[in-house]
Image (cartoon, rainbow, N blue to C red):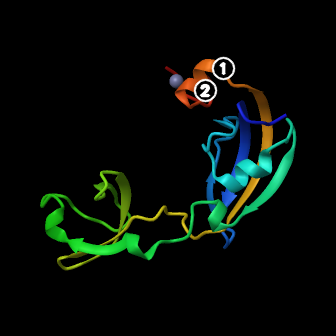
Amino acid sequence: MIKNGTVVSLNYELKNGAGEMIDQNQPGEPFSYIHGIGQIVPGLEKALEGANVGDKKDVVVPPEEGYGEKKEELVFKVERSNFPADKDLQPGMQFMAEMKDGRQVPFTIQKIEGEDVHIDGNHPLAGETLHFSVEVTAVREASQEEMEHGHVHGPGGHQH
Ligand code: ZN
């Protein structure tokens, strides 16, 4: 049964509110994570608590239990000169920016207007209601080493 400290393997599909496929695992290669340590969005983690191998669930996760609401203060424009001159900037490109508190935050270029580059530091799925279809394919206890590393080892996980 899925509880904190178990390694869970899932077949999953993720669609947005418009029903468009956003993400899914490769056939035959379930996604694995350690339950209870925030590796997946809170709404899905909560819904999987107590589930067993073979269980199938459709889970609707609102933004506040998914990737959060879109924050307008993370959408702004900067000058083209902040980027390397030889870089061919395109909408959709991602880069890391250092915030005032030293954190590295991924930003996406929305559009380029002359010398203005409009950028968005929100998660691409911020503000989205997430529609998951999941099937639990395996559940096991996490090893002590996996708990220390904070990730799954072996198939579907780190191979180090
Ligand atoms: Zn490791």
Q: Which element carries disc 1, helix, strand or loop?
A: loop
Question: CB at mark 2 closer than 8 A to ligand 1?
Answer: no
Q: Position of residue 15 (x, y in %)?
A: 67, 62
Q: Is 57 or 144 nearer to us in this picture?
A: 144
Q: Can residue 20 be spotted in the picture?
A: no
For residue 63, above or below residue 103: below
Residue 118 appears in which quarter of the rendering?
bottom left
Label 1, residues with CA under 10 Å away: few <14, some 14-19, many ≥20 = some
For residue 157, above or below residue 44: above
In the shown orientation, is residue 113 left or right of residue 22? left
Residue 90 appears in which quarter of the rendering?
bottom left
In the shown orientation, is residue 69 left or right of residue 11? left
Q: Amino acid at mark 1?
A: Ser
For residue 97, above or below residue 20: above
Residue at image coords 73%, 40%:
10
Q: Position of residue 84 (x, y in %)?
A: 15, 58
Question: Which residue matches tag 2?
Answer: 147
Label 2, residues with CA under 10 Å away: few <14, some 14-19, many ≥20 = some
Q: Position of residue 147 (x, y in %)?
A: 61, 26
Residue at image coords 29%, 56%:
97
| C-beta proximity under 8 Å, tags 2 and 1 | yes
Residue at image coords 37%, 55%:
105
Q: Amino acid at mark 2?
A: Met
In the shown orientation, is residue 5 left or right of residue 126? right
The disc placed on residue 45 is none
Separation of residues labelled 2 and 1 (CA atoms): 6 Å
Position of the N terminus, as image quadrant, is: top right
Q: Which element carries disc 2, helix, strand or loop?
A: helix
Residue at image coords 32%, 75%:
76
Question: Which residue matches tag 1?
Answer: 143
